[in-house]
Image: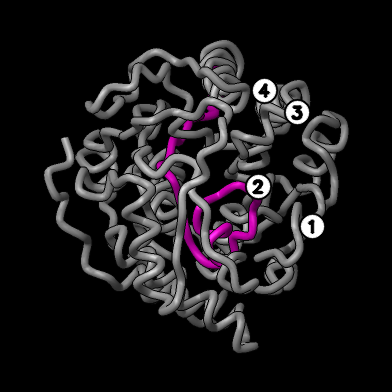
Amino acid sequence: MGHGARALEGVAVSASSWRGTSVFMTGHTGFKGGWLALMLAELGAKVHGLALEPPIEPSLFATARIADRLTSHVVADVLDLGRVRAAMAAARPSVVFHLAAQPLVRRSYREPVDTFATNVMGTVHVLQAASEVGGVAAVVNVTSDKCYENRERPEPYREHEAMGGHDPYSASKGCAELATAAWRRSFLGPRGVRVASARAGNVIGGGDWAEDRLVPDFLRAIDAGRELVLRSPDATRPWQHVLEPLAGYVRLAELLRSPGGERFADAWNFGPAAGDVRPVRWVAQELCAGMPGASWSIDRAAQPHEAGLLALDSAKARELLGWTPRWDAAQAIRRTLDWHRAWSAGKDMRDFSLAQLREHAAAVPAPVGGTP
């Protein structure tokens, strides 16, 4: 168990509940998956990962040397049901976290078929394997805040509202939610496997180098001596540090495994307080304030459709899971810039990442700020 496990107890009911627990997760070479793998390993879990090679270089997975903290690391595609089934059977997990995905809206316009294949059938394969491999107690499928039928309204979306999606990415995540509900009712629930889905807001944090994302685009521009170019400065999003929803996923998995945990086998939103549903231009201004000399401008060219308004109602997670965000959006931006500066300075990024994990776990929960 990592020496910081006691300090990480704030993300879960009890660090002891994870000590020695076999966890199978997909997508651990990605941004969110890498942070989750590091968090679970630090809590003492035996983390088994299945994923493609890191999708971009540099990557959090390599930079923070996450492979060293894993019990097993299988390079495979979730579209290969046989590999998924075999890897899960070898891991003999109690908990499954599914994060492997094609996560980018703009790429989904270029690669719609691949996006649907990965996000829908990849999910089906993980759920099917979990229904066949004995010993699985809980499954947490990570989808997206964009799974809702977005009506461009200011009110936040609640878990019972309709799935939808204008772009292929959003629609594929809505489909993944429907598949999760079907496997819960038809196969996993009857076998006593408790299945939940998790919908987070727009996450930021150190180690994200993905294309067409605001903060990575800003950091690339800074490193190259260019200004940030914004596509939709007035679009609003629920901004949060990546550790916020990950703490919620861990909490959710713990409760799914607890006595009476079937009541948590449902869909859950993990979004920030209402005050952190901010326009893109606000985030750009905060980023520039944290990096003297940085600037931004607006791209006036026609762009593929992306939602203009999006917010989540996370009252259910606060009330029933006891989950509350700890860092507000401004703090999340500062921590992200701190991580990037440390990486640029050549620091040990696993140590730095673990320090941020502990700092987050020890933080006093942020005020709800009027969250509905």
Q: Secondary structure at mark 3?
A: loop
Asked whether residue 202 is drawn in magenta, I would say yes
Report the magenta residues as a range. 190-219
Q: Which residue was labeled with disc 3?
A: 111
How crowded is the residue under tag 1: few (<14 C-alpha within 10 Å), some, or many (20+)? some
How far separated are the C-alphas under marks 4 and 2?
17 Å
The answer to whether residue 372 is left or right of residue 205 is left
Q: Give the alpha-carbon distance from disc 3 to disc 4, as whole Å.
A: 14 Å
Numbered disc 1: secondary structure = strand
Q: Nearer the viewer, residue 35 or 337?
A: 337
Q: Earlier in the sequence, mark 4 or mark 2?
A: 2
Residue on which the image places disc 1? 73
Instruction: Estimate how packed mark 4 is, as few (under 14), some (14 to 19) or many (20 or more) residues with alpha carbons within 10 Å.
Output: many
Which amino acid type corresponds to the residue marked 1 in the rendered image? Answer: His
Q: Residue at x 16, y 35 (%)?
A: 372
Which residue is labeled 4 in the image?
120
Q: Nearer the viewer, mark 4 or mark 1?
A: 4
Q: How many marks?
A: 4
